[in-house]
Amino acid sequence: MSRKYFAAQDTNYTRRLAEYAVSLDFSDLPEEVVERVKMMTLHTLGVSLAAAPVALSGASIRVAKAVNGGSGGGASVWIGGERLSAASAAFANGTIADILDWEDCAWTGHPSAGVIPAAMAVAEERHCTGREYIAAVAAGLEVYQRVAMAVQPPADFDHNRGWALCNWQIFAACTPAAKLLKLDSRRMNQTFGMACMYAAMPTNMQQATMSNAYHYQHGIAAQNGILAALSAAGGVDNLEDCFDIPYAYCEQLTTAVDRSWLDRLLGEHFYTLDILIKHWPANMWLQTPLELLSLMIAEHGIRPDEVEEIVLDPPTQYRMHSYEEGFSSLMEAQFSIPFVLAACLLDPQPGPNWYAPERLNSPEVIALAGRVKAGPGRETTLMESFIGYQNGRHPEKTLTVKMKDGRVFSRTQSIHKGHPADMLSREEFQDLFRREASFALSAERTEALIDFIGSLDQVHDMSSFHAHIA
């Protein structure tokens, strides 16, 4: 009798992805991909360092240390330099990387908060070279982008059901972990299978309650990606071809499965280059309004006490909330266009200063946020925005600032700085990193870290990273 647990489809998507991830070498990467991996690493580290003053950073490090059974291990926590196991360090760093919502945004989520913490932790612990790290990050981003797109929801998706980005986030973490552990293609295939088991359940609870627990999801995905790779490395039976067997992964998430994404342009195009880098510490759909206001502040010297009203046209779905009693959480503020515009008016230099606890309920912030109004245009829905972004577009927004003395300033923009069509230069990444790192490191150590990340392809042992962060 033949043993057949599932009616497997006659496809080999999982094996192709596994073989691609295992075989991808540094020498296969175009120069622009190598540079983007370096700068994404720099930016992810930077936004994590910028989160040092936020209470959740310390809490996540304490949780990671407790799970680790105290100090000890071969991977560094980016804030403070505590050494823990790779999985525990990835949990802390993955959480911290998302706290200010400042890292990146792919078509489907925030892969940098998974791929960078997981790859950095394993590379450091295993004494990998910088080139091995770069190739592992590139492999993780390419696998992540394709898997995530294969399971995106249909056009009539009910947003209240829960956005699953921290479900597929695990593939950004497990892929580089397995690659740096030097697993063969069969074990990589099984790592994907283990990732299905470790993946988080899609839920909208964190957004429905506007809880900062949202940021823990990214740390959990980074940690679980490493656990998935370690489990496969230890040896499991079967558990292969998870993207080919019906109901193993894809069908659990969507009724609009499109497996053609799994190997689309594999080896021909690097979707790493299509990832947006956030210029501001706020939700992705707040970037354009912030960019517009910042430009107008610089050009016209706008002061908060001079502003009568700010109008955003068209308004953005789920992002126009403002409350007379103030904001109840970091996440509630990060997702509010009125709040971040008020914060930017009061302090045009971004960072955790925007989200200091006393600012969430500041009468000055509340009053300014209350002056931000929705324009007459049809509200831009989040689903429309995501679909547009996936097709190379971005929502066009007009911000109009009306002054108490009668002056009116207005600007319109679609593609903002950090969008793939207007990417930051190396110098701009470095300047942004200096601002980010200033909340945790001295200027001297900041410059040393910039030099280290900028020359990752020359690093012989990634454990040397610890000296720059401790």
Image (tube, rainbow, N blue to C red):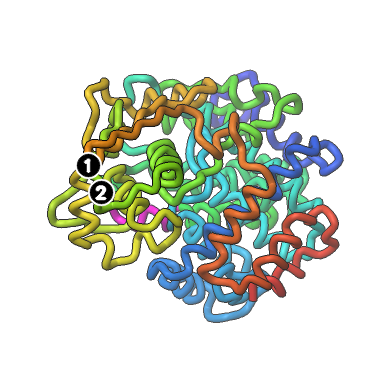
Residue, disc 1: 405
Q: In the picture, residue 190 is in which quadrant?
A: top right
Q: Which residues are magenta?
A: 209-217
Q: Residue 8 or 465: which is nearer the viewer?
A: 465
- Residue 357 in the image, given as x and y percentages of width and height: 29, 66
Residue 210 is covered by the magenta coloring: yes
Q: Is residue 97 visible?
A: yes
The amino acid sitting under disc 2 is: Glu
- Relative side of 151 to 139, left or right: left
Mark sitting on residue 306: 2
Circles 1 and 2: CB atoms closer than 8 Å: yes
- Residue at the far left in the pictured view: 324
Q: In the rendered view, tell whether residue 413 sits above or below residue 179.
A: above
Mark sitting on residue 266: none
The quarter in which the N terminus is drawn is top right
Residue at 61 percent of width and 27 percent of height:
262
